[in-house]
Amino acid sequence: MAEHFHLNTPLLESVSMSKRVGATVYLKMENSQPSGSFKIRGIGHLCQQLATQSKGVVCSSGGNAGMAAAYVARKMSVPATIIVPSSSPQLVVQRLQDEGATVRIVGKVWDDANAEALRLAETEGLTYVPPFDHPLLWQGHATMITEVAASLGPGVKPGAVLVSVGGGGLLCGVIQGLKDTGWSDVPIIAMETVGADCFNAAVKAGKVVTLDDITSEAKCLGAKTVCTKAFEYSQRSEFTIISEIVTDQEALQAVETFLDEERVLVEMACGAALAAVYTGLIRRLQEEGRLPSLLGPLLVIVCGGSSVDMKQLATLKHKLQT
């Protein structure tokens, strides 16, 4: 079996983004993973630890965790059952089936699908693959930061890291990676969309809170409650985590600008992070003194996403413009 399932992804310099920010911008291209997103790092690592003797894996997902679990299960010759909420686009269901997974549609949001996945794990003896809340996932995701450190070379470290937050798994992995590389002092800008902002809500409330509903179109950010570990990190003084939100329209605009300028199509969940550059939010944070005015290289995690194609993009555009 392969040592691991993820690829060492390219670290690309973006000239157009660098121009906007006034500092070098590096893109960690997690969209080029075999499953379409960063999720394969953590899920591959977790399955290698927990699912080698499994009679099957079950994963609840808005799309990307499911794609990663289905891909890894196929490579390990283990059956995969993926539970998705009804908000998942048809193309996600089709891609999961193409990976050989059994797909079940349960509930309206991810939390509903997750309850069913936990039930199946219990009743059918399947290995439960959590999409974001598990230390083995964070360990796997941390490898992207160690790769960045190797690519940048000794003596170079990011001025800040830009990430999207859904349930908080990527954020926890990035923090783990920063700790592993001795970069704990690097600020993190954690981006969400209005209506899928469980981390921002927790930071504001000073405790973990559960959103009433997911009203954002960035469905892959759609966890109603952020994982406790991500919230705990936000309360610790050794890390600087800046939590910000953008509108769905700004996230979608970022997806389109990124497609035009970098010739890469990502989903809206990823657009939330990209929007920090395109809306001028990074510059605003500098003006407010929350980021240094002379910023070192900005590292953008292009988390990717498998739930988008041109048709889906047109649908989102129509929805958000009416």
Image: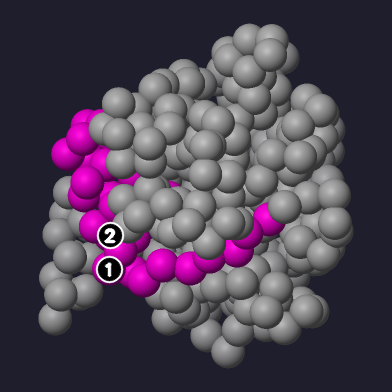
On the image, the x and y values in percent for residue 113 come to: 59, 70
Q: Vertical placement of 124 versus 292: above or below?
A: below
187 or 250, nearer to the observer: 187
Q: Vertical placement of 139 versus 170: above or below?
A: above
Q: Quadrant of residue 304?
A: top left
> What secondary structure is marked by label 1?
helix
Residue 175 located left or right of residue 311: right
Q: Quadrant of residue 76?
A: top right
Magenta segment: 241-270
Q: Main secondary structure of the magenta part?
A: helix
Q: Is residue 79 visible?
A: no
Question: Quick one: label 1, few (<14), some, or many (20+) residues within 10 Å?
Answer: many
- The residue wearing badge 2 is 252
Residue 157 located left or right of residue 285: right
Question: Quick one: label 2, few (<14), some, or many (20+) residues within 10 Å?
Answer: many
- The residue wearing badge 1 is 249
Q: Was residue 260 drawn as part of the magenta stretch in this picture?
A: yes
- The disc labelled 1 sits on which kind of residue? Gln
221 or 4, nearer to the observer: 221
The reply to whether the C-beta atoms of the residues labelled 2 and 1 are less than 8 Å apart is: yes
